[in-house]
Amino acid sequence: MISETLQKARAFEAQYGPHIPDSERPAFHATPTIGWMNDPNGFSFYKGECHLFYQYYPYSNEWGPMHWGHLKTRDFLRWKRLPAALAPDQEYDSSGCFSGGAVELPDGRQLLMYTGVQRSHNADGFLQDVQTQCVAVGDGVNYEKWGGNPVLDGKDLPEGGSTTDFRDPKVWRDKDGDFYAVIGNRTADGSGAILLYRGIEDFKGEFVRTLDQCHNQYGKMWECPDFFPLDGKQVLMTSPQDMKPVGLEFHAGNGTLCLIGEYDPEKGFFRQSAQAIDYGLDFYAPQTLEAPDGRRIMIAWMQNWDTVNSKPYHCRWFGQMTLPRELSLKDGRLIQNPVRELEAYRGARAIHQNIPVCGEINLPGVRGRVLDMTVTVRPTGPELYRWFRVRVAKDGEHETSIRYRPDQGTLKLDRIRSGLPRDIVHTRSFLVRPRNGEIKLRIILDRYSLEVFVNDGEQAASAVIYTRQEADAITFEAGGSVMMDVEKYDLDFF
Ligand code: FRU
């Protein structure tokens, strides 16, 4: 049965969504049908297709009572719109259907597991959330919430666990066919923990253990967890709120955290290292899936809670997802690269090799806003250059730049002049590791964003930009002199 609230959302998006022309959206990054989008939800395969749900408020470009929007794709790049999947229409989710996951059940139906939020006045008269875990089951388009919801609530928490911060189940089926979920929680010390549950397919959940805990080291509440094997190790990802900066690794505010370690199902998860996932300005709440061909693919909200009030005036959609990325591990670190499907969309190319750069230059055939460009830079001789800079999305007034300083080993992403209307955080620097003195930047541009992958995915940095599309010049500049190769492809989605 489709509730009135869901019917209303579906009618609204069907009526007004098509008013937004494709030319006002990114060419291949997922956006909401209309209105607001945040976290990716239920990123998973179902009957051979990749489904992506998302936190959704269709009626405004601001966050509101959360629905689940719905998209699907065959290649991670072209997205087909489906009607909204969930609406806040029950008592236990009356304040929102928060983030969660999806999985195919043994009987062929698709299970959505999400956080139901109910807000009410607490003993001090303050408004407070109660968060529980709920399920809905469907056929890939329509979903029925289970009559016995919630599946998990306060009584399923370990001692000291918060019922106000208990959210974002990520559900999966392991190789033995067992169903598990990881869920974020706040513990008695006020900081986050990731809890593991099993038995989800029977609409119940049995607490297994706390997988890892923040102990006030990496931020506070740990949101949107994911837990998966990768290249012989086990990865636990989460998006911590209220991070403290640590050198150039973690910045203040909403951050991302990748914990790499070993997992023994009998004994638990043993963390060996911690790193940020993305080093740019806009990246949060990543979720992964295992593709039928075995690849581990990650997508995230390409936005940051601290910058959501800096949006283009009158925009009819707000929030977009990152380009899905293939994950691997190398030397104990997370490697991220654009899904290989992107290469099928490569069109006109411009290749320039061994170009000396001293001062600022542009190159024939190298401009545009929807493209895939790799720039490799090396010193011309034994003497080190001072800096190298690529500027994209450029006209007389605007630009977005990436600058490398070999003496510090830092890359700086700067979108001060990228069309955002407010003076918020616009730069971020991070440490990179040149290889034999060489630095390689793969830059993906798509109308309203820039993602850079450094040295074959050793680091990734993402940022939204809102520059007018006519600002499409690209320049290369060095302080000192460098030798440069550029390989640029237009991406043909039109
Ligand atoms: C993360 C988050 C989640 C929550 C959702 C609400 O961005 O805060 O923890 O489920 O957004 O929209």
Image: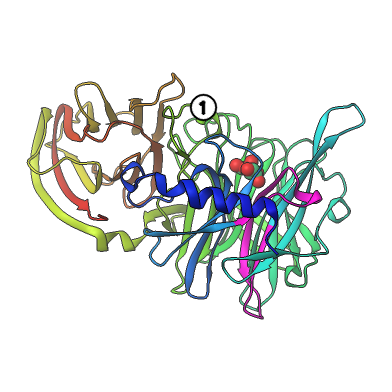
Is 115 in front, or is 258?
115
Q: Does residue 130 appear to the left or right of 168 in the view shown?
A: right
Bounds of the magenta segment: 85-113
Q: Residue furthest bottom?
A: 107
- The quarter of the image holding the C terminus is bottom left
**In the depicted structure, whether residue 343 falls above or below residue 459:** below
Is 266 in front, or is 283?
283
Q: Residue at x 56, y 40 (%)?
A: 59
Q: Amino acid at mark 1?
A: Asn
The 10 Å Cα crowd at callout 1, few under 14, some 14 to 19, many 20 or more, is some
**In the depicted structure, whether residue 83 falls above or below residue 131:** below
Dot 1 corresponds to which residue? 309
Residue 263 in which image quadrant: bottom right
> Could you say whether the residue bearing mark 1 is in a helix, strand or loop?
loop
The x and y percentages for residue 473 are 17, 34
The quarter of the picture showing ligand 1: top right
Q: Does residue 367 appear to the left or right of 271 in the view shown?
A: left
Q: Is residue 321 visible?
A: no
**In the depicted structure, whether residue 344 falls above or below residue 24:** below
Q: Residue at x 64, y 75 (%)?
A: 109
